[in-house]
Image (cartoon, rainbow, N blue to C red):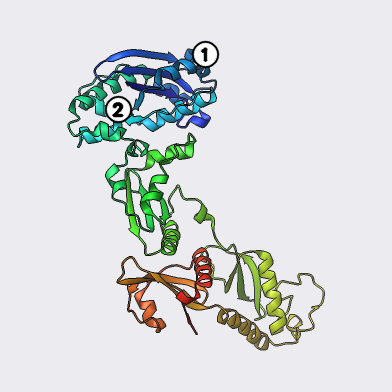
Amino acid sequence: MYAIVDIETTGGHASANGITEIAVVIHDGMNIVDRFESLLNPEVPIPFYIQGLTGISNEMVSAAPRFRDVAHHIHELIHDKIFIAHNVNFDYSFLKYHLGLAGHNLNCKKLCTVRLGRKIFPGLPSYSLGKFSRHMGVEIENRHRAAGDAEATAVLFSMMLANDREGHIVQALNQRSKEQSLPPNLPKEQVEALPFTPGVYYFKDAKGKVVYVGKAKNLKKRVCSHFQNNKPNKQKQDFLRSIYSIYYQESGTELMAFVLEAIEIKRLWPENNRALKRFEHAWGLYAFEDQNGYVRLAIDKRRKYSNPVHTISSVLDGYSLVRGLMDEFGLCPKLCFIQKNNDPCTSPACKGACTGHESSTDYNDKVLAAISHLKSALPTYAFFDAGRTLAEKSCILIEGGQFYGMGYLAHDFASDDLPSLKSALTPYPPNEYIKNMVFQHASRFPDRTRVFS
């Protein structure tokens, strides 16, 4: 038995919205045998644009039952049936969530008439309910009302049952099939084609724009995990609706996947990626010449297109670094913005640059020596690991303490010559997150690291 369901709601996700109308059509595989429909009081105001779309106003539902008043009857009607809807995960997430609030657990097998329509009647320009029904000659009475849409979905499903010569419905109901958990517009074949290897995957929308980039130790397992948890919140529901296709790149190792993910998120800036967008070393050590010709060092927030001589994760680390340079190279605390008052310089190491007793030439030589020391202390090394095939190896290069680039080399590539190695890799913009991640791996696996002097 099948329960064909349509609901009208106050918004796009269950956790913050109510149901304004529900219709359930019970289908035995041959005919419609029962129906239930009702307006519902969502207990929250219906937005104006929803009222315009559905024609359901706050006045119409003011005297209607609340969902919890009919929850038991709805659960009894559908809990032991196969749950069917046009974009099934939307309707199912709403009913599962609101039935759960009313003390009922919903755990049905599901069928999506969007996904089945693509398989049984392939090649149509659109599988939205209105356009799909029109193409199939099904007239919808009261479009965007629960009863009208549910009845049309029931007719479409009857057509699918009659024309399913390749057994797509049976395959979709197979317990091992995860198809009904997939987003409605994502072809199952693209998921099935994913390899069980490390890599980076890209979710794209209807226009081919990348909306999410992720990395994986196992591409197929990781991608499928996105669809196993059908949370009722807005972020999850909007995310699933936006996915129309998947593209992927295999990586030799999980580390290479991590690095490529960070690069691609910075390059593409997908709307659903958040964590790596925020990661930056927010502070830098800057050098500039003042009006008296003295080169001064200053800790300041990093700004776009700025060029610090060194990057720091916190302002406290920055001041600690500058104090160390002051002690080692005899720099003036006033010219390094450590001492900020108008009192005389308190450092015994200062030779009077702040009062003009030490020439700018002599003082600047000390500042340049301090900067040179900082840069010389930053390592240059390559981290090697497995490639995508046995014939190659992966390589990530850190040059002067900054991420330089990465790539795949022939397994017998001679890696002792730094210029040759650099020419064989793809360079990328510096990235603090990648630099720190590679440093951690190099520390754990020194046998895979080649240090250049």
Question: In terms of depth relative to the viewer, which is nearer, 21 or 346?
Answer: 21
Residue at 49% over, 28% down: 97
Mark 2 residue element: helix
Which residue lies under the disc numbered 2? 129
Q: Amino acid at mark 1?
A: Ser
Q: Secondary structure at mark 1?
A: loop
x 37%, y 48%: residue: 203
| Residue 377 shown left or right of residue 21 in the figure | right
Callout 2 crowding tier (Cα within 10 Å): few <14, some 14–19, many ≥20? many
Quarter of the figure with the N terminus: top left
Q: Amino acid at mark 2?
A: Leu
Tell me where residue 159 appears, x and y as whole percent.
Answer: 21, 24
Question: Earlier along the polypeptide chain: callout 1 or callout 2?
Answer: 1
Q: Tell me the number on the disc at residue 62.
A: 1
In the picture, the disc for residue 134 is none
- Front-most of residues 384 and 152: 384
Depth check, front residue: 214 or 440: 440
Q: Residue 375: where, in percent of width, then height?
A: 56, 79
Q: Locate residue 38: give its quadrant.
A: top left
Q: Quadrant of residue 376?
A: bottom right
390, 437: nearer the viewer: 390
C-alpha distance separating marks 1 and 2: 29 Å
Who's the residue at 54% across and 20% down the image?
43
Please indicate whether residue 325 sits to the left or right of residue 344 in the image: left
Residue 273 in view, yes or no? yes
**Label 1 CA crowd tier, 10 Å (few <14, some 14–19, many 20+):** some
